[in-house]
Image (spheres, rainbow, N blue to C red):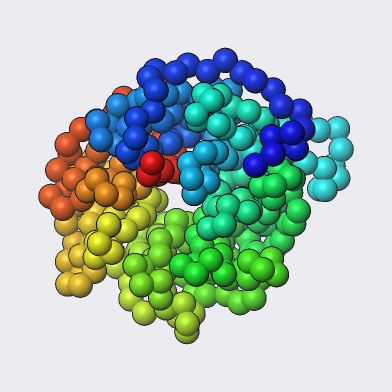
Amino acid sequence: MNMNQVLGIVFFTTTIVTSTQAGTTVYIPLGTGNMVIAVDAATDNIIAKYQNINNAHGLVATSDGEYLIAGSLNENPSSTTDPSTPSGNLYLVHPAHGHMMSAIPAVGSSHHQAITPDDKYVISTHSGRGTISFMDMSTYKTVKEIKTGIVPNYTIISKNGKYAYVSNTVSANISVIDLAKQTVVRSLESGPAPEHLSMSKDGLHIYVANSGKGTVSKVDIKSGNIVKSYKIGRAIHGLDISDDGMRLFVSSKKDRKLVAIDLDSNKQHEVKLSPSPYHLNTIKGTNKVYVSSRNKPIIWVIDQKSLQIINTITLPAGEGHQMAVVHD
């Protein structure tokens, strides 16, 4: 990538705890902590901190792990009401160099991010605008903004890289985006108030966390219909699938638990986590699940099979949000 194309590059002081080792690194935006941290997944130790990243909620990494792109929930003050005027920021981080490289103008407050498998576009959901945007990674500019539904929340990409799926929380559906055309081509059922999404291992189904009813829906992509529903608990939020694709993990903030669904038998197992388990990611190749707390600066490290708490990561500030997992 040509760094000369980045306009207004500003370098900030960054605290490096230790150099990143080969293995698996988990990057976690800390929201109100105004930073992103790097965690060594082998030891669960924080190995780096990247400062001056304001209220980042969403985060993705390029496939080679060279760059991170974080989206801010903040809106910039503006004297204009023109909706085409950029009012938000995406932050470009270069972990090997140890700093945040640039604040890139975005169309507005960004909730979550996704990145296409070819690393060409970063997709951001803009809940207040009812849109998603495409930022071109070769120019670091927004090249397209499209409407999806009311309060778009989360985006995942199909296994073949041809489609993106966006949950629309208030519209209660999932928009299907043709990535080549950058247009909405159809919609899928979801359940009430869909938020986080996860793809089945075979790529034929989407699992949807429906915060409105505390359920997870299994949606058949081909038909667009819900084919199964799992009752979980109140205020569910985080969602991800196990390494082998046979177990689904869901967090319930109000019931203070992490639930594991065995997808072959539909049996549910749970572990109590308090307070308010929030975002979660399975850390591929480690048999771990990282679960953040909404109300306390910690990450619980959970064994995928036994659901035992095997470690706790104390965060320097803020709260953990959408994590990016990089395998070196």
177 or 33: which is nearer to us?
Answer: 177
Q: Nearer the viewer, residue 231 or 142?
A: 142
The residue that appears at 66% across and 47% down in the rendered structure is 137
**Nearer to me, 139 or 211:** 139
Quadrant where the image shows the N terminus: top right
In the rendered image, residue 304, in percent from the top left (x then y), is placed at 20, 50
Relative to 115, say whether 15 is above or below. Answer: above
Residue 80 image point, x, y percent: 87, 38
* Location of residue 313 with respect to 261 vertically, above or below: above
Residue at 44% in and 18% down: 16
Q: Which quadrant would residue 116 be assigned to in this image? A: bottom right
Report which quarter residue 8 is drawn in.
top right
Q: Is residue 130 rendered to the left or right of residue 253?
A: right
Q: Quick check: can you spot residue 315?
A: no
227 versus 23 height, above or below:
below
* Residue at x 48%, y 41% (from the top left corner): 65
- Residue lying furthest bottom: 223
Residue 92 image offset from top left, x and y in percent:
61, 35
